[in-house]
Amino acid sequence: MADESQEIGGIHFPFPFPPYPIQKDFMAELYKVLEAGKIGIFESPTGTGKSLSLICGALSWLRDFERKRVQAEARLLAPGTGPTCGGQNSLPSSSSCQEPSGTPRAGGEPDWVTEFVQKKEERDLVERLKEEQVKRKKREEHLQQVGQDGRRLKFAAKRMKKEEEETETLLRLSREMLAEGTGPERLEQLECGEEELVLAEYESDEERRASRVDDDEEDDLEEEHITKNLCVNEDVKKLGSVQLMNDRCVDMQRSKHEKNGAGEDKPKRRRRKIQTSCPFHNHEQMQLLRDEILLEVKDMEQLVALGKEARACPYYGSRFAIPAAQLVVLPYPMLLHAATRQAAGIRLQGQVVIIDEAHNLIDTITNIYSTEVNGSQLCQAYSQLLQYMERYGKRLKAKNLMYIKQILYLLEKFVAVLGGNVKQNPSTQSLLQTGSELKSINDFLFQSQVDNINLFKVQRYLEKSMVSRKLFGFTERFGVVLPSPSASQENRNLDGFQHFLKSLQSGPTEDSLEEGQATAPRPASPLMHIEAFLAALTTANQDGRVILSRQGSVGQSSLKFLLLNPAVHFAQVVKECRAVVIAGGTMQPVSDFREQLLACSGVEAERVVEFSCGHVIPPDNILPLIICSGPSNQQLEFTYQRRELPQMMEETGRILCNLCNVVPGGVVCFFPSYEYLRQVHAHWDKTGLLARLSVKKKLFQEPKRASQVEQVLTAYSKCITCCIQAGGHLTGALLLSVVGGKMSEGINFSDDLGRCVVMVGMPYPNLKSPELQEKMAYLDQTLPRTQGQAPPGKMLIENLCMKAVNQSIGRAIRHQRDFASIVLLDHRYARPAVLAKLPAWIRDRVEVKATFGPAFAAMRKFHREKSHPCLV
């Protein structure tokens, strides 16, 4: 479709088709937020084109902002002009102006000093703008040249592949000649083709030497590693596990650097075949791939295809393109984690950040910075680091040796607080006392007897020295063996620790290295996980807690850091960025974002803008009902105390039987948990309700395994299609799902796949969870309590419940002509405080039915009118 320019409030928004009125309002409000540099909370129901509105609105603002900036730069660089404060020549990104020349600065400098400093700043600004203009012009000319020579990347990839094949052939011939004892006379008898191979290899070396980047650039390639889903190396991809893929990638890069840094005169060690450099990690090819990425917008599949064709890593090629890109799309865990963000080269200063699907933003930040280590990892890290120190201790500087000893001390005390000993195998150490214990950070440090160690300095040492990576390579080279669980009592008592040290030093034999057997790659160094835990312990005492979980043995026990204040990490985003937009289909209740995230991040209330639009469907295309009692006048209250009563489960079955008689197509029913769904299903099977339900609808049940979800959804969809086409007594299918499960997010039950969504009860979280109780107590202590409202801790429980409900019931209505009914089975939904937390497009149309009769009549009328409009 051809682009259409939609003018809204004097601003042109490119759109692929005429937008809905709510999309126009959405884009106009988004433009204002970005222009004013504010924090926006945007809610637009699924099916209203929210993502498209975000893209078009943001790119329109970016287009206008860039145009204004270029015009301002041109005026500044014009002869006889200069920067003027707040005037026509000021840059649009300027946030403040210099003081007038007649105003004394701090310290009482004279006017001529102030004027001199101001003119110098203006000259520096002009010089900086000139340099940026030259760089931008060169980059644009370079990309234009790349665009004109579209086959450049393909030809370069073919040339590189041919060189590699020629090199491999030459090396093979050399090995054969050496094996045959061939002397110089044999070299003179080489055929012409072999002479060409030598010449090609020589020329390839010359080209590589000419194009080789300096050591600093090469070192930049080996950065903190993050999840890779753009890998095109088949040997790495077949490992399956993301962690193993990451480890193999880092190991291959390390092997490349070790090979490049080795001198010709140094004796070569025999290495395992597994440690070969990645053929796709080539700087020259990745630079070419970067240019292709910047030339035209490409999706993930196109990046992978281009990387395979160019024999260049799409992941690192994409990272090289970040500094020159105007729009970067990335998973928001990568954006929200500071270390990962820095490793990827993402700079937030003065940028605009738009977070889509942000309904679980708070939980995501909490999970990113909450970390857990088990006893096995602690003991393994201790063993690796101890052996490393024993082997290289004399080479280490005193300061580095001191930090390593401090880390060993920390690991020893962490295992001790779990009830174990690092000098014994963790799987053989049984615990007499089990259970969980929750501590503040300070109390945990005191109990562990490590409060005398400066964890900030230890953390900085771990980051700068990268000792966790060194341990990974050290383990690959020498191996680390824990005490055997089957060791005899005599060996265990053999001077204890000396025997353990001896076992640590028994790594792979020389014979095994000579054979080069390809063994499975080891997982990442456990010190990497412990490094994250130590970093978490530097959090302010009031913002986190430590959970000591003692389960069976030391190896199974764990230490978990729980983040209570996600705002402490989100504050950097809102402070550095020009503007932040938090958008989602169901953002209600919004109070969580305002109070827990923004207010605690130091954002002023006047900087926050809320925008919520309605749905694109006509008002009569949705029927939301709150049913307070069932067909037998049993009040519907699915609390923990009542929901397992036989009469409650039977009443639920009777309601579904009646609904399935009048609802065509698919019915999706959500239960609070997998366990409750299992109990209800078993009770229905016992009482015959399951057979009655199967008369009108074929039953499907959400699987616990994610790998089976697609299979169930396909069968569910085919059943509905066949029933509608064939007619007969079977009118569709009934899908029994779980709130917060695989079907409650990201699944579209559009049209006949979801003509009715039923919510059984209110899915409150587990109030007995120690993590949740601590979070409630934290909010009660830190957030102000509004008069007439529940305490912040109780509000958290209600908000978590309603967020889950809103996500689930939004699965049905997916486009403008769609229609569906929404049934909430619990009288508590009729409370004003709960009603207020439903999305506006549902809340404004909801009908509360005290008894089942009127509710059933409304359902029958609604679906008869929508399914057979000609009969009405």
Image (cartoon, rainbow, N blue to C red):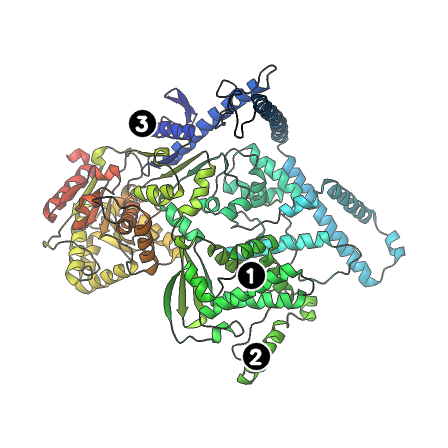
Mark in the foreground, 2 or 1: 2
Looking at the image, is mark 3 or mark 1 earlier in the sequence? 3
Q: Secondary structure at mark 3?
A: helix
- Residue farthest top in this picture: 80
Q: With respect to residue 382, does 753 lie above or below?
A: above
**Gap between marks 2 and 1, in whole Å?**
25 Å
Q: Is residue 777 shown left or right of residue 550?
A: left
C-beta proximity under 8 Å, tags 2 and 1 = no
Residue beneath the point at 55% across and 51% down: 225
Q: Secondary structure at mark 2?
A: loop
Residue under numbered circle 3: 21
Residue under numbered circle 1: 525
The residue lying toward the viewer, choosing from 384 and 17, is 384
Mark in the foreground, 3 or 1: 1
Mark in the foreground, 3 or 2: 2
Residue beneath the point at 48% across and 68% down: 415
Res 518 visible: no
- Residue farthest bottom in this picture: 490
Looking at the image, is mark 2 or mark 1 earlier in the sequence? 2
Query: Residue 633, image x and y in percent?
Result: 9, 53
The residue lying toward the viewer, choosing from 640 and 781, is 781
Q: Is residue 27 shown left or right of residue 399?
A: left
Q: Amino acid at mark 1?
A: Ser
**Gap between marks 3 and 2, in whole Å?**
77 Å
Looking at the image, is mark 3 or mark 2 earlier in the sequence? 3
Query: Which corner quadrant holds the N terminus?
Result: top left
Residue under numbered circle 2: 496
